[in-house]
Amino acid sequence: MSAAVLPSVAPASDSGGHHGALTADRAASLLAACSTARRASELHAAVVRKGLDSDRAVAFRLQRAYAASGRLDHSLTLLGRTKDPTTIFYTSAIHAHSSRGLHLPGLALLSDMLSEGLLPTAHTLSASLPACRGLSLGRALHAYAFKLALSGDSYVATALLSMYARAGDAAAARALFDEMPDPHVVSVTAMLTCYANMGALDDARRLFDGLPRKDFICWNAMIDGYTQHGKPNEALQLFRRMLRSSAEPDEVTVVLVLSAVAQLGTVESGKWLHSYVKNSRCVQLNVRVATALVDMYCKCGSLEDAVAVFHGIGNKDIVVWNAMINGYAMHGDSRKALEMFVQLRDQGLWPTDITFIGLLNACSHSGLVEEGRSFFQSMEHEYGIDPKIEHYGCMVDLLGRAGLIEEAFHLVQSLTITPDAVMWVSLLAACRLHKNMALGQRIADFLVANGLANSGMYILLSNIYAAVGKWEEVARVRSMMKASGIQKEPGCSAIEIDRKVYEFVAGDMSHPCTDEIYAMLDKMNALVKEHGHVPQTELVLHDLDEATKEKALAVHSEKLAVAFGLISSRPGSTIKIVKNLRACSDCHAVLKLISKITSRKIVFRDRNRFHHFVDGSCTCGDYW
Ligand SMILES: [Zn+2]
Ligand SMILES: [Zn+2]
């Protein structure tokens, strides 16, 4: 036990804050009400002067008063000096540590106590369980609690449930939950958080809806679940409901909802949230919230708003610079992203691995091969940051897009870490883009032979085999696709009109204005054909005749969203679309022409980046 220096016991002027003799009872009650370390040491001095420190009740209260006021060192020294401390002394010390996140010291105290031959009480167990990270120790304590017939105690059961929930063992947590006659709100929240974290959102929602009074922790857990598991619209709706409830959102809530809005890409909702933060009394516009705002505006396609927030931040840390660099990279403004790097170095900030992902992406999106190589080198040699798989992925992408496919392939082969699917897809896409079918076929053969081909690669593989006339291989890829049973994630495009989000999948007929949308779509398809567009039917993988393939392409989700945008927004206004997958090249070509024919700017976010279609061309330079 540490031997911290305890405060001196020199006479204090008004030791007890009370006129008359200080008795043990009086000292104990004063200590029970004591809330600051300074007051605790004043009382400590008085207690020693009166010789009351050997009184066990006083010694215990003193130990607890130091712990409660944050002087765990003093508290532990007192515990060390106590002759034959009982369970209650240890329990108080364990609680003081585990409730402050000092898990290992808390568990060490439990171990000290057990080796003294003392038996834990229900309080000891419920104070120790929050310190258990991981299941093995938690399970051991569960077994011990059962042996001592304490596992049915409501505090112990709640702490056990929270332990299992934290460790992600939903089944064990649920078993305890179902045994509780009247689960406390702490248990419900722990169970709900466990479900939300693992993406069992319906189970989480049932518990959430069943809570008569919900505090902000429950709201945050539910919103977090939706945000982390691809249901940003639900997260946003729930936040609107929260504002009508009695619970007050905090900084965490706002950062979560901003991340949901960033996923949705709906700038009007983002602006509404921004003005909410400005006018809120409970949420400060600090650097963390501002960073989430910068990120949201970048992902919602409004670089101007992101820049305005960025410049308004007083003490910028590297995280917010990273958000801005990534924003510029995403929008294809590589020059600005690279400039930002020089500026942040001038400010004396040190880049992180995320900074380099932004920079390498910027180089990749603009074909800046030499700059990219030099960042990749300096990252390791100047800044001491080991490249991760994402950085190698960026380099493979950069080289592949620029046509240096052999070099990219060598880089992948030289890796000491296992290349991920993203890298193989980049390489295959580069082979197709630069028509290097020989290498494409070599890579394809390798992936198929080693069982590494996955649903994200099938179209690329099949295109490559089709291009070299390997029809047997094309058929093989198709049957693999069917056999894999993995449904390709359906393409979905969203558009926000008057703060309402409309989502479209390919061939969608669910919108109330379907007839008008399809009429506009027909018009669009006819117009682009007049302007020389030839539908890229080779992108359709099924065994269909040409006309049917054309029809399949014509109803792609992004085209439907644009058609809806054209009929439901002011002429001349910008149309903003967000798609969950990479832009398909037929739609890319059509959207370029539509921007020219209708004189509309179209801002299109795909899974990786933004495309700004203006007057027949795209800011990506057809390079994505
Ligand atoms: Zn398409
Ligand atoms: Zn583009």
Image: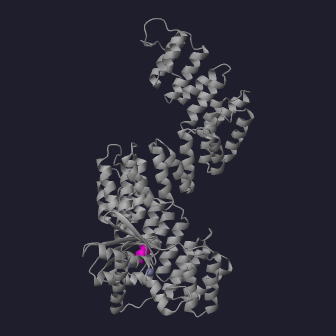
Looking at this view, is 490 or 457 the one in front? 490
Q: Residue at x 61, y 36 (%)?
A: 105
In the image, residue 218 sits, relative to residue 305, either above or below, namely above
Quadrant showing the C terminus: bottom left
Instruction: Looking at the picture, tell me which residue is in the foreground, 458 or 346.
Output: 458
Q: Quadrant of ligand 2?
A: bottom left
The front one of 472 and 367 is 472
- Magenta-colored stretch includes residue 184: no
Q: Position of residue 534 (x, y in %)?
A: 41, 91
Taken as a whole, is the magenta stretch helix, strand or loop?
helix
Residue 433 at x, y percent in the picture: 48, 85
Coordinates of residue 559 in the picture (x, y in percent): 39, 79
* Segment colored magenta: 363-368
Question: Can residue 560 be seen at all in this image of the molecule?
Answer: yes
Residue 456 vs 7, above or below: the answer is: below
Quarter location, residue 452: bottom right
Relative to 586, does residue 29 appear above or below in the rendering?
A: above
